[in-house]
Image (spheres, rainbow, N blue to C red):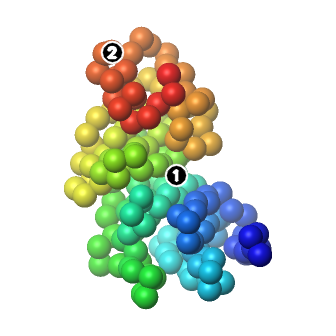
């Protein structure tokens, strides 16, 4: 069947699909992945203190998952093994820190090299996917996002030319 049913076991806040797998992050702090073809469920990661997972996104190449966690000011990059060993490489989990309040949503830019995040601190940030360094930040953004697609973003101050160029570069619909 084209449609399958998956049960996370708790309220789900985050969901993403990479063409072969579905991930869900829930109030229970678990990130669960379903292999659609084989109908196999795997708990890929659990937050150490059980905090809810607010958002999760597959990288374009499917080798990493970015996660934002309730009331944390950081992103968590989870490297995922190949199809034959679909598990998180616990030794290489990386944090991207810099926001001053918890992160509402996360996405990979189309180039696959940059991670985008939006935070309750009224900033949008672009991160280098490999190093975790913040590449740029746009301040004073009033956020009403359910995903990082820029359809519900408003600015409280005029944007600079650099900020406009960054938004256009990363696919903002202006």
Farthest-out residue, top: 158
Viewer-proximal residue among 112 and 30 = 112
Percent position of residue 123, x then y: 42, 33
Residue at the spot 60% in from the left edge and 69% down from the top edge: 22
Residue at (39% x, 45% y) in the render: 109
Q: Quadrant of residue 137?
A: top left
**Rendered location of residue 73, percent (x, y):** 42, 49
- Residue 14 vs 30, above or below: the answer is above
- In the image, residue 150 lies at what x, y percent? 53, 32
**x and y percent of residue 91 in the render?**
29, 78
- Please state if 146 lies on the left or on the right of 157 as rendered: right
Q: Is residue 102 left or right of residue 35?
A: left
Q: Secondary structure at mark 2?
A: loop
Q: Is residue 77 above or below residue 87?
A: above
Label 2 or label 1, whichever lies nearer to me, is: 2
Q: Examine the rendering and report whether any part of residue 52 can be seen.
A: no
The CA span between labels 2 and 1 is: 30 Å
- Left/right placement of residue 11 relative to residue 157 reads right
Q: Residue 71 — which label?
A: 1
Is 103 positioned to the left or the right of 81 in the image?
Answer: right
Label at residue 160 = 2
Q: Earlier in the sequence, mark 2 or mark 1?
A: 1
Q: How dense is the environment of label 2, judged by Cα within 10 Å: few (below 14), some, or many (20 and up)?
A: few
Quadrant including the N terminus: bottom right
Please tell me in which quadrant of the rendered image residue 25 appears: bottom right
Question: Measuring 50% from the left and 22% from the top, which residue is drawn there?
Answer: 174
Q: Is residue 153 visible?
A: yes
Residue drawn at (34%, 47%), measured in percent from left and top? 111
Mark 1 crowd level (few <14, some 14–19, many ≥20, 10 Å Cα): some
């Amino acid at each position: 069947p084209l449609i399958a049913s998956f049960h996370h076991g708790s309220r789900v806040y985050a969901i993403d699909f990479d063409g072969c797998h579905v991930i869900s992050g829930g109030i229970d702090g678990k990130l669960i992945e379903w292999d659609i073809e084989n109908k196999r469920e795997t708990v890929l990661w659990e937050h150490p203190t059980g905090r809810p997972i607010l958002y999760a996104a597959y990288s374009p190449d499917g080798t990493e998952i970015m996660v934002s966690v309730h009331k944390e000011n950081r992103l968590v990059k989870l490297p995922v093994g190949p199809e034959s060993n679909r598990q998180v490489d616990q030794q290489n989990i990386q944090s991207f820190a810099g926001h001053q309040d918890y992160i509402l949503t996360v996405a990979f830019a189309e180039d696959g090299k940059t991670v985008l995040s939006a935070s309750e601190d009224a900033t949008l940030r672009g991160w280098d996917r490999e190093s975790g360094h913040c590449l740029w930040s746009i301040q004073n953004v009033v956020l009403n996002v359910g995903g990082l697609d820029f359809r519900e973003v408003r600015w409280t101050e005029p944007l600079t030319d650099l900020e406009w160029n960054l938004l256009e570069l990363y696919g903002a619909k202006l």
